[in-house]
Amino acid sequence: AQTVTQSQPEMSVQEAETVTLSCTYDTSESDYYLFWYKQPPSRQMILVIRQEAYKQQNATENRFSVNFQKAAKSFSLKISDSQLGDAAMYFCAYRETTSGTYKYIFGTGTRLKVLA
Amino acid sequence: GAVVSQHPSWVICKSGTSVKIECRSLDFQATTMFWYRQFPKQSLMLMATSNEGSKATYEQGVEKDKFLINHASLTLSTLTVTSAHPEDSSFYICSARSSTGGSYGYTFGSGTRLTVV
C-alpha cells in the first residue's frame, strides 16, 4: 500500500526567508500525482502545487516550487520569500492513476510558523 | 474556479440525534465525493468515497450504519451521522472530483465542525 511521510511536525521560518518542507512516499506505481495542500486556521484546504510523476520538470507556482526526485520518492516544497500568510498546516498528498479509486493519501502534515 | 459549498459550517446536537452535512459542487459536476474526518492537529482521515448513483465505499473501520452517505446527483452529496455520540465530535470535510478527471486537484469544502453534547 502507498504511504506518505512528512517527517517534520513543525517548522519555523523568518519572514522573507526560504523554507523547505519534506515529503517522502512509497509506491510501486510509475504514474501518479503529487500535491501540496495548505490548511490555514480557517481549515479550508487550498491547493498549493501539483506534480505529475511522468514529468521530470519540477513544478513552480510563484513563490512555491517543488523538488521532485522520483527515484528517491521525494517531493519537497520550497517556499521563497515567506510571508505571514504562509503560516498554516501543509499536507503532502499522493494520488494514484491506475486503480480507479482516485483517492488521496495524505501525510501527517507540517505546521509552518512564520516569524515576523 | 471550482467551488464546493459545505453546510453547515458548525453544528451542535444532542447525543442520540442525527445530523446531516451537505456538500454541493456549485459550478462543476462532481462524479466522486470523498468524505474525511479530521481530529485536532491531525491529518485528514478518509472515511468513504461516493460515486454519483452508486453506494459509497467505506474505509476499513468506518461504520456504514453510523455514517450514511448519499450521492444522488452530480452536484450534491450528503453525510448523515446517525445516533450521534460525543465521540463523533470532529471536523468533517468533503472533497469533490470533477467529471473532467481532477488531475489538477480536487476541490474541498470548507468543513463542518460537529459537537455532540
Image (cartoon, coloured by chain):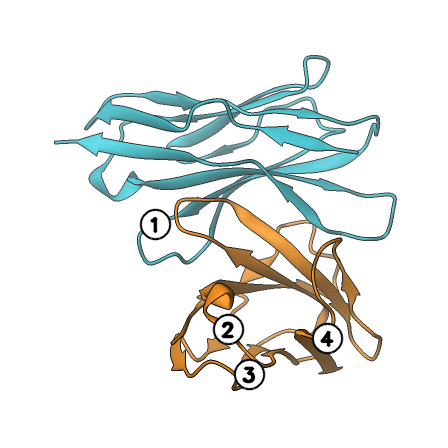
Chain colours: A cyan, B orange
Where is residue B109 shown, x and y percent of the image?
Answer: 50, 66
In the image, residue A114 above or below residue A13: below
Q: Is residue A104 left or right of residue B1?
A: right
Of mark 4 and mark 2, the one earlier in the sequence is 4
| Label placed on residue B20 | 3
Q: Are marks 3 and 2 in contact (CB under 8 Å)?
A: no
Report which residue position mark 1 lands on: A40
* Percent coordinates x, y for residue A111 in the rendering: 36, 35
| SS label for mark 4 | loop
Q: Quadrant of the C terminus of chain B?
A: bottom left
Determine the chain carrying the residue at label 1. A
Q: Identify the residue at the far right of this view.
A: A99
Calculate the distance from the C-alpha at mark 1 to the C-alpha at mark 3: 25 Å
Question: Which residue lies under the disc numbered 2?
Answer: B85
Mark sitting earlier along the chain (3/2): 3
Give the CA distance from mark 2 to mark 1: 28 Å
Tell me whether marks 3 and 2 sit on the same chain: yes
Q: Where is mark 4, residue-wise?
A: B65
Gap between marks 4 and 1 measured at Cα: 32 Å
Give coordinates of residue B94: x percent, y percent. 57, 65
